[in-house]
Amino acid sequence: MTSAKQRLVIVEGSALHLGLRIAGALAIIATAFALPYVLEPFRLSQIAGACVYAMAVVGLNLLAGFGGQISLGHAAFFGLGAYTTGVLTTGYGVDPALSFLVGIVVCFAVGVIVAFPALRLRGIYVALVTLAVGLIFPTLVIRFADLTGGSTGLFGVTYQPPDLAYFSGFNGRVYWNYWLAVAGLALACLVVRNLMNGRFGRSVIALRDNETAAVIMGVNRTGTRVVVFGTSASIAGLAGSLFAVSSGLLTPLSFSLLLTLYFLAGMIIGGASSFWGPVLGGFLIYFVPVWSAELSSINGSQNLAGVVFGVIIILITFFLRSGLAGLVRTLLGLVVRVEPRMPVAVPSAARASLSEPRLTERHHLSAPADDRPELDRSGVGSTDAARNH
Amino acid sequence: MEFELFLTRLVQGINNGAIYAFLALALVCTYRGSKALNLAQGELAMICTFVSWSLAANGVPLPLAILGGVVVGGLSGAAIERTLIRPLGRDAHYSVLLVCVGLFLAINALAGFIWGGDPQSFPAVVPDAPDDFVPVMGVRLRYQQLVILVVLLVLVAALYAVFRYTRFGLSMRAAASNPDSASLVGVRVNRVNAWGWVLAGAVGALLGPLIAPSTTLSTSMFFTFIIYACAAATVGGFDSPIGAVIGGLFIGVTENLVASYVGFIGDSLKLTVALVILLVVLMVKPSGLLGTREVERV
Amino acid sequence: MSLELQGVSAGYGAGDVLHEISLDVRPGEVVVILGANGAGKTTLMRAVSGVIPRRGRILFEGKDISRTGPEQIVRLGLAQVPQGRGTFVDLTVEENLRTGALSRRDSARVNEDLDRWYTTYPRLAERRRQKAGLLSGGEQQMLAVSRAMMSRPRLLLCDEPSLGLSPRLTQELFASLRSINEEWDMSMLIVEQNAAIALGIATRGYLLEVGTIARAGSADELSDSDAVRAAYLGY
Ligand SMILES: Nc1ncnc2c1ncn2[C@@H]1O[C@H](COP(=O)(O)OP(=O)(O)OP(=O)(O)O)[C@@H](O)[C@H]1O
Ligand SMILES: [Mg+2]
């Protein structure tokens, strides 16, 4: 372990700390603006697709990472948003923007409905509820074929770009879908960040880490869980809506259990309970299959992506419970150290308490009964590294 | 005529239900000891069926080829328990589920990688030509389907007898009921749980070759069956083998009758019927018909 | 020596609960361990029977068992009645008793022993086909003692056998523990809150305070000690 002296020390809230954070944000924004000029259009639409997946993963992370409630049905919320937009715009001539809103509301409502049975159950039974809901969705799409196009699919979902010079060129539609996806992803990240960086976020973490203690401390279990479920579902739903307008074609098969498992894979690989890990994970689950199909022409090579994801999920569950985000944080922690503004003498027990939600990220993967400190230790670095966002 | 039609549908339901029950039995075997919902159970069965198919395609007599697959299934079960489940410790529902998700993706893709994405036809153990059936009251009981049903009943009877009347069975039940006390009376709890995985792997590997002649052999052959199996195990109670069989048959028969007689549902919502039953059971009695109630901590 | 602990420490990961405990139980002796809630009595029992990892030396009949697992230890002849009884609630009473004999090889004599415990506790015989979870607390305690005895141990660890029992049932239970001790010449290590009754059948005792032995002595010495009287005997 490098000693504190050799590390660059940054005081939290200092000009340097603030400056670095602003610089980071600016770099991201600059990249977003630069990409349309440097990438070929088909690459740009791939980025848009990855942003949409990343959004869904960010939504799932709110429920399964921060909330500690695994969901085996998130593809259904994604699909529900997609079909809401698809059906409303193609069938009823509704403005796509309005259909996004309807999708968000519908997904929130369904999320809340699913949250209630899940509230009373624990362990595998929660997973079973979400599994059932997730699988019912495609069957309903097929059953109500006159509305949804059934197994053949729903064609021609689009969102006409606004009348701006920027979007008027040959690739205007690609740019427009790209910006929709980028804006959606940014919105999702901001919503999750704001929710988790406050009182509400502390309640969510407290419920995940020790439900009984949290309830005794006055956390509103039902309210919190229901809002988390609903918000998570509506983020996935908005991602689905954006997927619908950018892909143009919806089939029930696109929203199968496999998609849910890929979302889970993205969350775990990127880093559950982290803010930017799921974004990374979302990009990975989109691009790894694309690359492995492009790189090799062996028959069945796209299967390699599945093998890789499966193995990585298992490895991460064992050795790197905070995923890539945690790994990066640990590595950064070796060179940079972010200190709290005033290192006053706070008893360590009190500091590790619920008053500082970011500290508890170490326990990210733990469902209430699954608290295994000895494994957590291996995943993430020391607390000072954990503070470094 | 009406009645004959009803009987045909009932028999169809029982045939499907037997398959659900079979796979649910495997789920129960792992759940009892490790409290793990092995989502990858179907995929494990699928890849073992491919192993049997490869053996048969290379000239091994079919029964031996199936036995080979069953052995591979049992060994893989043991290996998974030993290396991926046991180290996570008891009550690690979340992590275990994630590992099973990982296994699901990995095994499914691995099979696709090795054997390709095209469905293969699988030879039947008994004659399976269109006229290979026993007519009973105008209903055709196909040999292949009878075989599944008989094997299922023999299997569950054997399991019941082992659980009920042998020392090994008593150890298994004690370990499932209270692992701490079980180790205090000398039960090697880990070893007993590993046997649960061995059984599950073998049961799944036996089911694959029995259904493959009609479903064809493909990497997705178990996608819906595993869902039905979850529903069946939930209805029967996740730790009860007999419950799994009752649950499987109940779901098979109900979905078939509902699909036939309720026009609104039709064939396309068959799976939905099973899933709705699953949800209702979870809300009304999560422990199922015959399962033991878990002690609630909150 | 039946059981001998030399500098045994143990805990649950976060830190040690027991610090360098040394004690012994001679053949045929009944030794009682007194201590407040949370003193580490149950932890001590778990350390001895191998349920939790521990350091130091634990000798059972001269053999070091400090690295042996619980399944093996019970085969060596050391059985435990866990705190809270550890009943297999969804097994029948008889099946519960039979689990006690799972560590034995001589199945033929198991039935003899079953009858023996049914005679000692007729209430168990009446309910032999019932689910054990339906038994009353006292009946479950009898079941737990009989189940441990079904392995024919030479040393019995009992963790708070009186927990949740009425004073009369407690009396009965200790009377039967005493007769087991005399009839089978079995050594016993008993954790008990009810100091008066436990010291009544014990030869010696230890007082455990926050994970260390605070006092040791014969039953009479402990009964006379002011510390024990004030804290556990209430006079
Ligand atoms: N499973 C566990 N995990 C972590 N700490 C534990 C565990 N069990 C007990 N402890 C802690 O170890 C200490 C000693 O507990 P122990 O159960 O040995 O006490 P005891 O003397 O048996 O008390 P009682 O009379 O209430 O049964 C306590 O502080 C307790 O909080
Ligand atoms: Mg105790």
Image: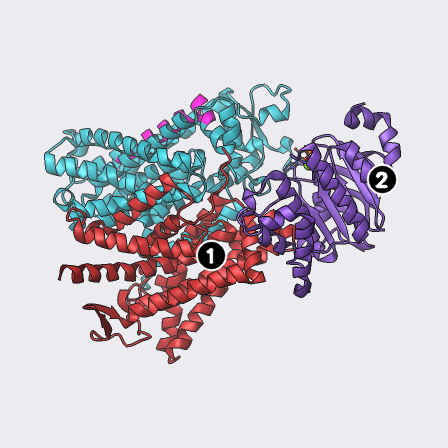
Chain colours: A cyan, B red, C purple
Q: Which element carries disc 1, helix, strand or loop? A: helix
State the residue at coordinates (18%, 68%): B138
On whether ligand 1 comes within 8 Å of the CB at mark 1, the answer is no
Residue sitting at x 62%, y 43%:
C140
Query: Residue A318, how many percent across, how many down?
Result: 52, 48
Residue A95 location, quadrant: top left
Residue ID for mark 2: C204
* Amino acid, disc 1: Cys
Q: Tell me the CA gap for discs 2 and 1.
A: 48 Å
Mark 2 vs mark 1: in front: 2
Percent coordinates x, y for residue B180 in the rendering: 61, 47
Name the chain under label 2. Answer: C
Above/below status of B155 relative to C141 = below
Q: Amino acid at mark 2?
A: Arg
Q: Is residue B150 left or right of residue B195?
A: left
Q: Quadrant of ligand 1?
A: top right
Question: Which of B124/A62 is in front?
Answer: B124
Is C46 on the left-hand or right-hand side of A247?
right
The disc at residue C33 is none
Residue A72 visible (yes or no): no
Tell me residue A32's x, y (percent).
32, 34
Classify residue C76 as left or right of residue A288: right
Using the image as rendered, state which of residue A386 and residue C225 is in the foreground. Answer: C225
Q: Residue B29, which numbered label?
A: 1
**Magenta region, residue range:** A181-203
- In the image, residue C135 lies at what x, y percent? 57, 43
Which quadrant of the rendered structure holds the N terminus of chain B?
Answer: bottom left
